[in-house]
Image (spheres, rainbow, N blue to C red):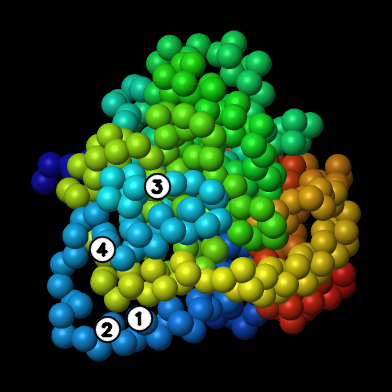
Amino acid sequence: MKTIDPARRINAVSEYYFSKKLKEIAEMNERGLDVISLGVGSPDLPPSEDAIEVLCQSAHQADTHGYQPYVGIPELRRAFADWYKKWYRVDLNPNTEIQPLIGSKEGILHISLAFLNPGDGVLVPNPGYPTYSSVSNLVEATIVPYDLKEKNDWQPDFEVLEKTDLSNIKLMWVNYPHMPTGAPATKELYQQLVDFGRKYGIVICNDNPYSFILNDHPMSILEIDGAKEICIEMNSLSKSQNMPGWRIAMLASNPQFVQWILKVKSNIDSGQFKPMMLAAAQALQAPKEWYERMNKIYRQRRKIAEEIMETLHCRFDPKQSGMFLWGKIPPEYKNSETLADEILYKARVFITPGFIFGSNGNNYIRISLCCKDEQLQEALIRIKSR
């Protein structure tokens, strides 16, 4: 029989780190080791009761189970537009400037397929979300990493970028508030990014799911004058509304960019379940008190996470936002994987090693706040006694 080989693109990516590590942790748990996972950022808090009630009521209706429009239902697009106006001070046309997504991770693929030809350059942050690189490899683009460093508050060095050969660069991934470092967004940074994109004809894609977590002033890159001409912003209900498994997200940009992305998306999926979209529209109406209650819980968890970092002699910036705590490991450990594995095997606590986000994360670890106080306290006890 002739040998069957996979497409070349399969060789350009590896299995997602969390996919492999969580299988190992599952095996440890089967042996009765009871590992506490502080790794993945999957909110353990529920969505609003109002959203769940809308989901249940709509799912009981006979006419809500068919295919839905590729552009999402009008109620959801209007809810996203109202959400952006209320919290981000951005006017969006719900008919032409918003595209619902089955998760922003999937949106990364849609955007990449819409804008990148094989060989086109894409600027990817180091450290940054690994999917930016893996999807760029899958579409056979040329990855050009750009450094984010602690000394620059994890922001791009635009002087260095302007000295880079940008002639082949088509797209730039940015993510503020930043994951994994928790670096906040600033108006000055967004202005620099818009100016940079316009000057060099580079599409700036801001991935913005963390702006409501431990952050009193949500911001959008689309607040900047002229941003829609060159920017795409993705947002998600996974973090802000505690809906990671619902896969409800969106992107916003100018009508032409949105239409190009829809061309790709409409050939890949068939839309979302109508009751979930109606429930998401309800969730987007959450008042300020909803976010305050959620952040009160995250603030308490953050205190315990900081104790864990201090116990490990890791240094961290207390101004971080988002649902993680990012800390620099002590010099006696050669890299983050060494420390993370020591904690896993000696204390039965899983903490994410920073190397998975790029070489500039090699000397850092990340703790997820998506874990109840009691588990965080138990993790602290285990780490102290390891």
Is residue 363 in sight in this rendering?
A: yes
Seen in the picture, residue 61 relative to 98 is either above or below; the reply is below
The circle drawn on residue 92 is 3
Residue 278 is situated, as x and y percent measured from the top left of the image, at 33, 72
Seen in the picture, residue 230 relative to 380 is either above or below; the reply is above
> In this figure, which residue is indicated by the disc labeled 4?
73
Which of pointers 2 and 4 lies earlier in the amino acid sequence? 2
* Number of the front mark, 3 or 2: 3
The circle drawn on residue 59 is 2
Q: Amino acid at mark 3?
A: Leu
Mark 4 to mark 1 CA distance (whole Å): 14 Å
* Number of the front mark, 4 or 1: 4
Quadrant the C terminus occupies:
bottom right
Q: Amino acid at mark 2?
A: Ala
Q: Nearer the viewer, residue 76 or 3?
A: 76
Residue 70 is situated, as x and y percent measured from the top left of the image, at 21, 56
* Number of the front mark, 4 or 3: 3
